[in-house]
Structure formats: structure tokens, C-alpha cells
Image (cartoon, rainbow, N blue to C red):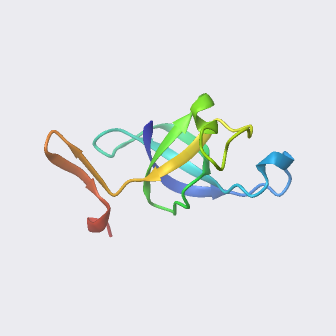
């Protein structure tokens, strides 16, 4: 599992029929301090995440393990919205304190 922040959306009106009904979001991967790392990633949204939210996402074959993505051709899925991230007793992220 990886941490990311939702930074955009992707709309595809023509796509493989098994992808119908999936919402696609654009993510930036985050490190444990909440800093952006690497490039962008498109992921299917299995939890109704929104713009700016910190999320957990999976890639590769693990992305097809959710109810919404099972047996679908995707290799990125958002599977959780982060409420609090605490490391070694220090809160690194708290959704309730975000603007």
C-alpha cells in the first residue's frame, strides 16, 4: 500500500466496457512526511475519495482485489481515505485539522 493525495480527475468517455462505472482519479504519491514524491498515477476509486484527500492506494495485481475492481483491467486502485497517520507517536497527518 502507498500513500497519495488526490490532485485531479480523469474522464474517459470511450473505454473497455468492463471499466464502465469506475471513477478515475489522478494521484501524487506521498512519503511518510506527506511530501510529494515521484510522478503522477491514475487509479480507480473504490471509496469515493475527493480532491485533496490523502488516500491509500495499491498498484499491480493488488489493484484488482477490491469489489469494484475485481476482474477488471486496472493496476491502480484507491482503497482507503486516510483520517489520521501516526508514526512513532507523532501525528504526521490529521484530516480533521486540514483546511
Q: Where is residue 70 drawn, in percent x and y? A: 68, 41
- Quadrant in which residue 73 is drawn: top right
Above or below, comparing residue 32 to residue 22 in the picture: above
Q: Where is residue 26 drawn, in percent x and y? A: 58, 50
Residue under the point 79% across and 54% down: 20
Quarter of the image containing the C terminus? bottom left
- Quadrant in which residue 65 is drawn: top right
Above or below, comparing residue 9 to residue 58 in the picture: below
1 horizontally vs 74: left or right: left
Q: Nearer the viewer, residue 3 or 8?
A: 3
Residue under the point 34% across and 44% down: 35
Above or below, comparing residue 40 to residue 97 in the picture: above
Quarter of the image containing the N terminus? top left
Residue under the point 30% across and 39% down: 32
**Residue farthest top in this picture:** 61
Q: Nearer the viewer, residue 51 or 71?
A: 71
Q: Where is residue 38 drawn, in percent x and y? A: 47, 35
Amino acid at each position: 500500500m502507498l500513500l497519495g493525495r488526490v490532485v485531479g480527475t480523469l474522464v474517459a468517455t470511450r473505454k473497455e466496457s468492463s471499466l464502465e462505472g469506475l471513477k478515475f482519479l489522478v494521484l501524487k504519491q506521498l512519503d511518510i512526511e506527506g511530501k510529494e514524491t515521484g510522478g503522477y498515477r491514475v487509479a480507480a476509486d473504490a471509496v469515493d475519495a475527493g480532491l485533496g484527500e490523502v488516500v491509500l492506494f495499491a498498484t499491480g495485481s493488488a489493484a484488482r482485489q477490491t469489489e469494484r475492481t475485481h476482474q477488471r483491467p486496472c493496476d491502480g486502485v484507491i482503497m482507503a481515505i486516510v483520517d489520521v497517520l501516526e508514526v512513532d507517536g507523532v501525528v504526521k497527518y490529521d484530516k480533521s485539522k486540514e483546511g
